[in-house]
Every structure is written in structure tokens, then in C-alpha cells.
């Protein structure tokens, strides 16, 4: 669903951020949407994630469209400023841990909030943020509820937001998808 929303939203030539590159699937996806004239910044705190992503980008032949940085996403603004970016069309967050790696290294509410605030400041006038929050791992439910609170504090005159939950009450650990965009 996150990809479906991004596909209708991102235009050729756009600047986008992958705030949690992981194994690079979303980074490759975004670099396909922005095309040859666009750019993607991808960040992750783990060296392993960046290495996996670099490989996948090369295999896909789109490495020239992506700048990868090892960083905590709460420090995104210095990264975007160092590249001269002041606006983005989309920031994508796929929270949680790196699949097939150390499940103890996971996104944390405090830095996720910092990163979401930073991205909000960067959104162009049709800009959006996509977030997938996983509730099945340790700390996942807390993080999802913090994202929910962050979303509910947004000024509804400036931002439209939605929340999708698969299975509603019968699947309390299913991932939750959030989308926020400037009105
Ligand atoms: C679910 S994975 C992302 C999956 C990825 N988007 C993909 O397509 O494969 C979550 C990633 O967030 C990263 N992460 C955790 N805390 C982070 C932080 N503070 N800043 C940036 N990345 C972080 C983890 O290292 C992990 O690789």
C-alpha cells in the first residue's frame, strides 16, 4: 500500500528520502519513481544495511540516482543541507529492524520523532511522508503509538493524514500504514 501511494505521488525529477534503507528495496523502488533526473537520499544507522543497499542499487543500475549516508535519521537535516536540498516530495519510513540481522537494532521512538519533524520541514507544497510501523517486535507497539500521537498533533489545516490498519481489532500486531501530505 505504501508503494501504491508513493507511485501515484512521486513525479519524475523529484527529490525523495528513504529514512530507513535496510536491504534497499524501498530505495530501489524510489529511484525508479524519480527517474534519471531525480535523486534519492538513503540513510541507515547500520553499515550492513548500506552495504546491502549499495549492492542492490548496482544490480538494478540505479546507483547514480542515490546518495547513501550512514546516519541516524534524526540528523537528516545536516545531510540534506550538505547536498543543497531544501525540499523533498516524499520521505519513506519503514520502521523496525533489519530483516535477517540483529533484531535488537531497531528504530526508536525518540529518533523516529526527530526524523519525522525534520522531514515535515522539508516537504514541498505537495510533499508527503509514508510510514509503516510494525507492532510485532519488542518496542514496536510503543513506537506505533508514538507515531500515532505525532500524527494527531499535526495541524489539520496544513496536513491531511490517514492511518490504515490491516484486520483492525482482530490483528493487533499487524503493521500500520500512515500517510501524511501537505494540503
Ligand atoms: C524494516 S528495516 C527497513 C527496510 C527497508 N526499507 C527495505 O526496503 O529493505 C528498518 C531499518 O531501519 C534502520 N534504523 C534503525 N534505527 C535507525 C535510525 N535511528 N536511523 C536510521 N535508520 C535506522 C535499521 O538499521 C533497519 O535497517
Image (cartoon, grey):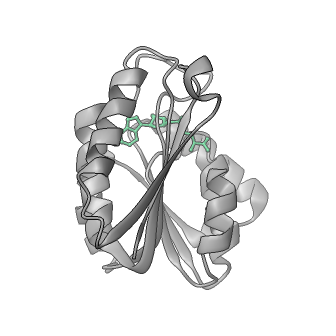
Looking at the image, is 129 positioned above or below residue 81? above
Q: Residue at x 67, y 78 (%)?
A: 35
Q: Is residue 6 above or below residue 177?
A: below
Q: For residue 17, say whether it is visible.
A: yes
- Please give the name of the residue rendered at 53% of the width and 19% of the height, measured from the top-left corner: 172
Image coords of residue 111 (percent x, y):
26, 40
- Residue drawn at 28 percent across, 33 percent down: 109
Residue 107, can we see it?
A: no
Q: Is residue 147 left or right of residue 163?
A: left
**Residue 50 on image: x %, y %:** 52, 44
Would you say 158 lies left or right of 168 here? left
Nearest to the observer: residue 36 or residue 177: 177
Where is the C terminus found, in terms of image quarters? bottom left
Residue sitting nearer the eye, 106 or 183: 183
Horizontal side of 46 relative to 84 (left or right) equals: right
Query: Which picture quadrant has residue 167?
Result: top right
Residue 171 higher or lower than 57, as above or below: above
Residue 145: percent from the left, percent from the top?
34, 31
On the image, the x and y values in percent for residue 112 come to 31, 42
- Is 21 on the left-hand or right-hand side of 56? left
Amino acid at each position: 500500500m505504501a508503494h501504491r501511494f508513493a507511485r501515484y505521488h512521486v513525479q519524475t525529477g523529484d527529490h525523495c528520502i528513504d529514512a530507513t534503507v535496510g536491504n534497499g528495496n524501498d530505495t530501489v523502488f524510489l529511484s525508479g519513481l524519480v527517474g534519471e533526473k531525480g535523486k534519492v537520499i538513503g540513510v541507515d544507522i547500520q553499515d550492513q544495511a548500506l552495504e546491502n543497499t549499495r549492492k542492490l542499487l548496482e544490480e538494478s543500475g540505479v546507483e547514480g540516482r542515490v546518495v547513501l549516508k550512514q546516519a541516524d535519521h534524526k540528523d537528516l537535516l545536516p545531510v540534506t543541507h550538505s547536498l543543497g536540498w531544501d525540499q523533498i516530495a516524499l520521505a519513506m519510513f519503514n520502521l523496525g529492524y533489519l530483516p535477517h540481522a540483529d533484531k535488537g537494532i531497531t528504530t526508536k521512538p525518540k529518533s523516529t520523532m526527530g526524523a519525522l519533524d525534520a522531514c515535515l520541514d522539508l516537504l514541498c507544497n505537495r510533499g508527503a511522508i509514508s510510514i509503516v510501523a510494525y507492532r510485532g517486535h519488542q518496542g514496536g507497539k510503543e513506537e506505533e503509538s508514538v507515531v500515532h500521537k505525532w500524527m494527531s498533533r499535526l495541524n489539520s489545516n496544513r496536513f491531511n493524514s490517514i492511518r490504515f490498519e490491516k484486520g483492525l481489532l482482530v490483528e493487533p500486531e499487524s503493521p500500520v500504514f500512515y500517510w501524511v501530505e501537505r494540503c
